[in-house]
Image (cartoon, rainbow, N blue to C red):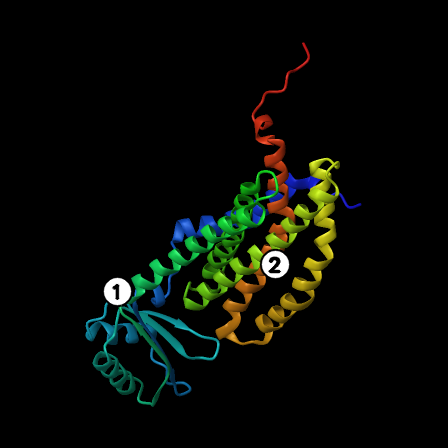
Amino acid sequence: MIDILSKRYLYFAISLLVIVPGIVLLALNGLPLSIDFTGGSLLEVQFETGKTPATADLVTLYEEAGINDAQITATESGSLQIRSSFLTNEVRDSILTAMKEKSGSEVSVIRFDSVGPSIGKQVASRAALAVAVAALAVVIYITAAFRKVPNAFRYGVCAIIAMVHDVAVVFSVAGIGALLFDWQIDALFLTALLTVIGFSVQDKVVVFDRIRENSSLLRKLEYEKLVNHSIVQTLQRSINTQLMTVEFLLLALALFGGVTLQEFSVILLVGLFSGTYSSIFVAAPILVLWEKREWANWFKRTETAQ
């Protein structure tokens, strides 16, 4: 039988290598929040070929309208995305008129999103509340469902730890994406994050449920071997369900779905893979680590021969 759990500290190290770089980037640069959370306006415009004004000129147009925080980004299609503080319809129209006069061409508005500061704060607070409620519900559900298993509470806590692992992976990817591709944390990111949490918990329940079943059938087996046996039994199901179906579809969407859906599909792709990975290589190993209380030996000095 495949021995998965004997290399559990290697799996923990791999997780840290994935999580730490992106989290460090977020700590240094801050969360790249979109207007969905901070409030503000996003105006995407397209000029006629060869008549796109210089970035400095567009910034000046915004400043003349009383907006001093405009940030301009060029897209692959040749349009310009301009992020700024909240624009009223009147200010937006005046800026578009000034753009038309400056460029001497027609200006096509591809996209205009505007969110007030109070709404942005509500979205951010409710997003955090949704994640907290989901975590609490997971602990209560798993503890209740596994109540006949010794130390049922541990299963819920280990599921939450693994869920936090998956959330950290998602934020790490977002931090790297923000640096390399100017990604932002928006409403679609929140949708992807909550989807990852849902799939993550589902995977943990499947693995833990098999451990629960084997606890009755193989009660004489040493706990680490019992958990390892349970993981191997669910391994094919996890691979077939995630990699062979959802992951391939998301990979196709990430490659061919266009710029708008790229961030969303990549976040889901990595997050769902992390959910499967953490079910096998994080949640169950932590359960064994807890059962054996291995932390007691982490900092114990080894006696040297005299």
Q: Quadrant of residue 122?
A: bottom left
Q: CA distance from mark 1 to mark 2?
A: 35 Å
Q: Which residue is mark 1?
A: 118
Residue visible at 38% across and 54% down in the picture: 30
In the picture shown, does residue 174 fall above or below 225?
A: below
Residue 90 in view (yes/no): yes
Picture coordinates of residue 74, whole percent (x, y): 42, 74
Q: Is residue 78 above or below residue 190?
A: below
SS for dot 1: helix
Q: Residues within 10 Å of mark 1 (few under 14, many from 20)?
A: few
Answer with mark 1 or mark 2, whichever residue precedes in sequence. Answer: 1
Quadrant of the frame with the C terminus: top right
Q: Nearer the viewer, residue 145 or 245?
A: 145
- SS under mark 2: helix
Q: Amino acid at mark 2?
A: Phe
Residue, disc 2? 273
Residue 108: x percent and y percent?
A: 36, 87
Residue 182 visible in image: no
> Horizontally, is 223 left or right of 196 in the view?
right
In the rendered structure, the answer to whether residue 173 lies left or right of residue 102 reads right
Rendered image quadrant of residue 124: bottom left
Q: Depth check: 120 or 160 in front?
A: 160
Asked if residue 202 is positioned above or below residue 139 in the image, the reply reads below
Q: In the image, residue 249 lies at what x, y percent?
A: 63, 71
